[in-house]
Image (spheres, helix red, strand yellow):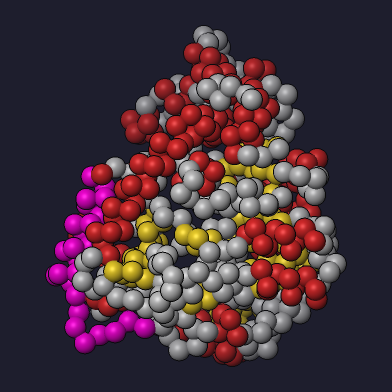
Amino acid sequence: MLNQNQTPLLNALKDNAARPHAPFYTPGHKLGEGIPQPLADLLGKAVFRADLTELADLDNLFAPQGVIQAAQQLAAEAFGASQTWFLVNGSTCGIEAAILATCGTGDKIILPRNVHSSAIAGLILSGAIPIFLNPEYDPVLDIAHSITPNAVESALQQHPDAKAVLTVYPTYYGVCGDLSAIANITHQYNIPLLVDEAHGAHFAFHPELPPSALAAGADLTVQSIHKVLGAMTQASMLHIQGNRIDGDRISKALQLVQSTSPSYLLLASLDAARQQMALHGKMLMSRTLQLANEARTKISQIPGLSVLQILSPPYEGGLGGSSSLGGLVGSPGFMALDETRLTVTVSDLGLTGFEADEILDEKFAVTAEFASLQHITFIISLGNTPADIKQLVQGFTTLAKEYRRTNLTVTNPNGQNLLTTQEYTLHFSPREAFFAVSETLPLAETSDRICAEIVCPYPPGIPVLMPGEIVTKPVINYLQKIQAMGGFISGCTDTTFKTLKVVK
């Protein structure tokens, strides 16, 4: 057992920042002396004394032998991994490295459609061929959940030469699928299970949270320590366990996608966040869960509002509170819920999630993580306070009383089931299509052409088109309906979605 009270990297950074010396190395601001005054006024100069480079005592991220190595070993033990890498380019570079380390050009990888765009970047960089699985989808709640074990097993039976399976756990809504079953199935083919656990870094530290991806049997997981724990933005970790992943290949892949000038502020924040959770994680998560449960209970009692939650069997729906709607709670795609993630359905108020989100932000200074057609989702973390929860509940109470519309129903656009029924044809690999000569055409002229860019609608936030896929009329109609209902299109060059880039 390592001494989790230690912070080797943080201590080394502190010592070097305090050491009197004449700096003739990067960065150019030289311990904050050259920082623009407006920036110094905002942040103070102290932080810039610690904005250092790879000095002798600070180790090297790409060949760690000192304090970075020690900090990563402490993190591995704290999070339950056999080996851990610190990431300064966010979870994005971790997902890219995971694919690069397991798949080469022409290799198949099985992954869900509600995957982050970083996975698509990983496909483009590696030349891997995606075998996409549609996630389990609830058309009433308008929420995509996880891929199911049966879907993974069927895909592996059809593609036994696949090199890896990648899944998202939890989803943006905090929904967790049956990861243990997926791991067991994947391992029957002796290939690794890769997990995008960007929003689940806290799972290992409290028994009332879903099991961590590593505890469920994942071979590799990537976590955004900054999203739900105490690290600085962009600071993430990649963990592995077992012998299905070559650690040397991970290290080499990370050298391709991480900065050669890593921020020691970010690295030190990972060291500090690990110590905080190793020593106080259960207490901090107990308090966070208490705040989240208070918010969930009070908001669910407000007329016209519902919250996403797991109900006791028999499952009558995915929402509790003032309404009970049909859902897939308790299904293989929704086996657990991160209770610190709060999704509130506002459609019974006659408001879209976008409208309610704007009102809460502008009128009540309550800012959500994201909004969709029917819902608003909030991240409740160790940094929130009872005052935050009080303000959130008061905001929703006033919203329901003063902004409710009568005789107006917010529903899914027709064709929402496209996510589970549409067949997608991959004509080129994402890499081939991305680097192919392309042209931009009016949307009406793109049917049956090969897409050359990523098209991701919000809601529900699942890539509907990506490089290499055939553009079809049902897909175009679906995207236009999402847009007309107040959603927006991301990923593509023309965010108004009047034109689309296709392979020439």
Relative image position of residue 225 (x, y in whole percent): 52, 42
Q: Nearer the viewer, residue 97 or 80?
A: 80
Q: Is residue 229 visible?
A: yes
Question: Bounds of the magenta span?
Answer: 387-411
Residue at (31, 48) in percent of width and height: 291
Location of residue 315 with respect to 238 vertically, above or below: below
Residue at (33, 47) in percent of width and height: 290
Residue at (35, 41) in percent of width and height: 287
Q: Nearer the viewer, residue 175 or 251?
A: 175
Q: Main secondary structure of the magenta part?
A: helix
Identify the image quadrant of residue 6. Answer: top right
Q: Is residue 457 visible?
A: no
Identify the image quadrant of residue 454. Answer: bottom right
Split into 4 quadrants, where in the image is the C terminus?
bottom right
Relative image position of residue 223 (x, y in whole percent): 58, 47
Q: Nearer the viewer, residue 54 or 190?
A: 190
Residue at (66, 68) in percent of width and height: 149
Relative image position of residue 135 (x, y in whole percent): 59, 72
Identify the image quadrant of residue 308. Answer: bottom left
Split into 4 quadrants, where in the image is the N terminus?
top right
In the displayed structure image, the side of residue 265 where residue 37 appears, left or right: left
